[in-house]
Amino acid sequence: MTTPDISIVRTVAGLRDTTDQWRARGLASALVPTMGALHDGHLSLVDLARAHAGRVIVSIFVNPTQFGPAEDLDTYPRDEAGDAAKLSKRGVDVIFAPDNAAMYPTGFATEVIVSSLTDCLCGAARPGHFTGVATIVAKLLNQARTDIAIFGEKDYQQLLVVKRLARDLDIGTEILAAPIVREPDGMALSSRNFYLTSAQRRRARQFNVALKNVAREVAAGDDIGASLARARNLLAAAGIAKIDYLEVRSAVDLSARTGSLGADDPVRVFGAVYVGKTRLIDNEPVG
Ligand code: AMP
């Protein structure tokens, strides 16, 4: 199927065909995996892809295996026509939008488990999530076989997991990271922000304020535990009572950090909170 000037491919064979032709013509290609409901954060990944490659594919697939049984798979926002219009304006060549049967045909029995990096943060809070992510990303990278693939630092743990699986499974695609795109008040753009009422949205801005406070204080030598405790108080005062995690960890291997920071130690502040029923994640570099 095709909208005015962007083609939508729904089968793995169709995707392979497209990228095989590009490769035969010597054209560099990039893949941007998404779950749709596209916002300016996603579109910044598209722009980065276009800066590196002559041909760009955006995949749109709400992957059921990365959602837990009590999570928002059924209500996750979906807007393929709106997404196609945005991607067409941005110069994307192909949308890959398979259905569940194309990605998980009957008898599907394989999982990709990345055993380090996944036992903390969202891996601890969402059991099985990263196995779902790693499996679908490994499939997408193998299906598209593009030169590069772009992932956002918004999902920083996911980015590290994807880099690790691409390396461990000898997938030839180079994984590039894109910085987090934020609203003017600091809130990271997310498809899940669509769930927030305007009152919740106002409260939610304190989430990034809290992370930035910790990043600044820890960079200045403050004790990590004390700084995180102040951030928790700030969130509680803003009515953000449920915190999944708020931690300072290595930006390289996610190992935990306590006390005060050593010199030349790249770390990030990671957080996941609930505003109402909506789970938000964000992270900030320290220093
Ligand atoms: P999703 O559709 O939420 O699975 O996200 C698809 C890709 O977009 C992932 O690599 C995300 O990290 C990235 N992404 C989502 N939100 C943002 C943002 N605000 N800034 C940069 N990248 C983002």
Image (cartoon, grey):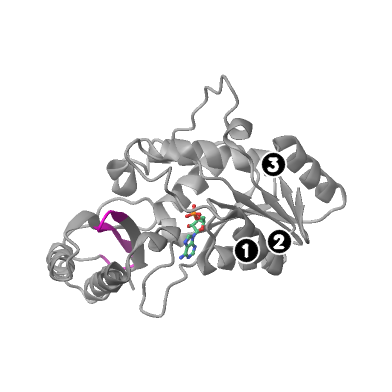
Q: Which residue is mark 3?
A: 10
Q: Is the C-beta separation of discs 2 and 1 under 8 Å?
A: yes
Residue 90: x and y in percent read 68, 68
In the image, 250 versus 79, the foreground residue is 79
Q: Is residue 123 left or right of residue 112?
A: left
Residue for point 34% across, 73% down: 287
- At x 72%, y 50%, the residue is 8
Q: Please check the rendered image and state whether residue 191 is part of the magenta-colored stretch, yes or no.
A: no
Q: Is residue 216 above or below residue 278?
A: below
**Label 2 to label 1: alpha-carbon separation:** 8 Å
Viewer can see residue 17: yes
Give the numbered dot on residue 117: none
Q: Position of residue 283 (x, y in %)?
A: 35, 63
Q: Quadrant of residue 274?
A: bottom left
Residue type, mark 1 in image: Val
For this rendering, which residue is in front, 172 or 158? 158
Asked which quadrant contains residue 249, the reply is bottom left
Dot 3: within a 10 Å radius of its alpha carbon, few (fewer than 14), some, or many (20 or more) residues? some
* Residue at image mark 1: 46
- Dot 3 lies on which element? loop
Query: Across the whole image, how many numbered discs are drawn on residues?
Result: 3
Q: Nearer the viewer, residue 88 or 283?
A: 88
Magenta region: 262-278
Q: Amino acid at mark 2?
A: Val
Dot 3 amino acid type: Arg
Mark 1 / mark 3, whichever is N-terminal: 3
